[in-house]
Amino acid sequence: MATDAKRLKTEGSDPLQSFLQWCEVVGLKLNNKVYISKEGTVAEYGMLAKEDIDEGELLFTIPRMALLHQGTTKVLDVLEEGKASLENTSGWVPLLLALMYEYTSPQSHWRPYLSLWSDFTALDHPMFWSKDERDRLLKGTGIPEAVDTDLTNIQKEYKDIVLPFITLHTDLWNPERHTLDLYRSLVAFVMAYSFQEPLDEEDEDEKDPNPPMMVPIADMLNHVSNHNANLEYTPECLKMVSVRSIRKGEEVFNTYGQMANWQLLHMYGFAEPYQSNSNDTADIPMSNVYKAAVQVTRSEAEQRLLVEKWSLLCEMEMVGDKGVFIFGKSGSLTDTEMYTTLKILCMSVEEFEDFRENEGWEEADDDEEKMLQALSNEGLPSLPPLWRHLVHAAARFTLDSYGEDMLKDKVLLEDEDGYAKLSSRQRRALQVRYGQKTILHQLLELTK
Ligand code: SAM
């Protein structure tokens, strides 16, 4: 890996110029009103407007042959032959094998593109932090658990699928060069740089999601929730189009999706300042709602009733062992699950018997609109007292599960000198933690 990185770095003059020349050769067309630069952007490479741009203008087009994926790589035949042995739940293995090959092959057609990232040391996802750092800085955010699962899966995937495959094809890969470390870096690269073409609406319920692919130039755009450009997919090409007007000198921002700060940090290694991320969310583990419900039981009979209610909710797939209820800045984002859970947990014995006997849960008598309204910031203060109490207590348990208390985080964020002294990891972790705590705190206020 280090050797590959060094070789890529010392070759050629300006990687950006070589890449832009390659873009012309492959037919990637850039509007004259935009340019790529490392200056004036929020993070390394990004796109900037040279002139004012109107809403709906085409910023660049990428022909499908310029996309890098399992169908366009030099090793496509080998990947196709070995298809059955490369299947896994994530569906990422063929692209990762293609990238391992193309990234280290001096003759690769994709070299001018991949040479933009001479090594992957700029990637600083929490998966590259020490476990202690993750557990200390991100306790309560959900990220340490997600990263532990990723690392276990990456190691298993490499050992059980990738290594046996590359050992069979030593003319293309070499286990000493295409190591687990390189594989892990490429997983982070795919997490942060790849695109997944959305399925047509009619296929959404039936087909597996499309596998990821690399989209040169589109992946040089940074993200903000308040973005000004969006990628469109057509049969011949992909198009980046402005979704509102962009002034000369402004950065062109794509959207990576509606991402909460914890998702941005987990998948992309950065977080937006907590107030500016309109998509920020906080999770309440379902187990905390159960814990809150246990607290209000007054007899063994009530405890037994609670166990029965919870099993019915599991059967209805409203709750699950590791499930979470999600709250955004304006209220619940999992309103059906949260509303049904509260409704059943707060039923009297008679109501519950009646509900179960009449299979009331199959009747879908609570319309979506009503549930959404009831669990919005406007509706929460008017919930029945017991419902409110359960949400309040569960939010409190969740707030208590963070390592640092909210006030300490607030002071740190507001103290300019103190904040400036924090490391980049400490800052990003603070933005994630504090954003989540703010949402949970707001929920406490709305349900008190
Ligand atoms: N800036 C990237 C580069 O120079 O290669 C191009 C964008 S790439 C698709 C995604 C990466 O850009 C992320 O993993 C993160 O490091 C960075 N990034 C994107 N949006 C950002 C933002 N709003 N703030 C900070 N970093 C951002």
Image (spheres, rainbow, N blue to C red):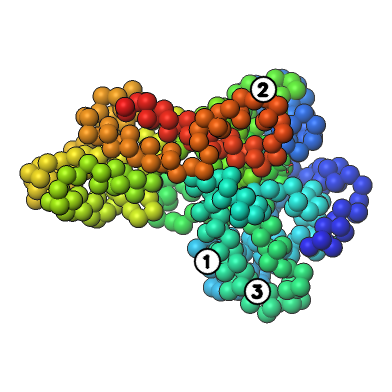
Q: What residue would you read off at disc 2?
A: 246
Question: Which callout, 3 or 1, points to the residue nearer the camera?
Answer: 3
**Going 25% across and 39% down the picture, which residue do you hit?**
342
Q: 58 or 249: which is nearer to us? A: 249
Q: Is residue 231 left or right of residue 98?
A: left
Give residue 427's quadrant in the image.
top right
Q: Considering only order in the chain, which callout, 1 or 3, is on the residue closer to the N terminus?
A: 1
Q: Is residue 245 above or below residue 20?
A: above
Residue 426 at x, y percent in the picture: 65, 40
* Amino acid identity at mark 2: Ile
Q: How many marks?
A: 3
Q: What residue would you read off at disc 1?
A: 88
Quarter of the rendered structure image containing ligand 1: top right
- In three-dimensional space, the C-alpha distance between marks 2 and 3, rounded to whole angstroms, equals 47 Å
Q: Considering only order in the chain, which callout, 1 or 2, is on the residue closer to the N terminus?
A: 1
Q: Is residue 99 above or below residue 363?
A: below
Q: Residue most toward the bottom? A: 168
- In three-dimensional space, the C-alpha distance between marks 3 and 1, rounded to whole angstroms, equals 14 Å
Q: Residues within 10 Å of mark 3 (few under 14, many from 20)?
A: some
* Amino acid identity at mark 1: Asn
**Going 48% across and 34% down the picture, which residue do you hit?**
437
What is the secondary structure assignment of the residue under circle 2? loop
> Does the rendering let one see residue 324?
yes
What is the secondary structure assignment of the residue under circle 3? helix
Is label 3's Cβ within 8 Å of ligand 1?
A: no
Q: What residue would you read off at disc 3?
A: 163
What is the secondary structure assignment of the residue under circle 1? loop
Is label 1's Cβ within 8 Å of ligand 1?
A: no
**Going 29% across and 52% down the picture, which residue do you hit?**
317
Q: Is residue 292 above or below residue 447?
A: below
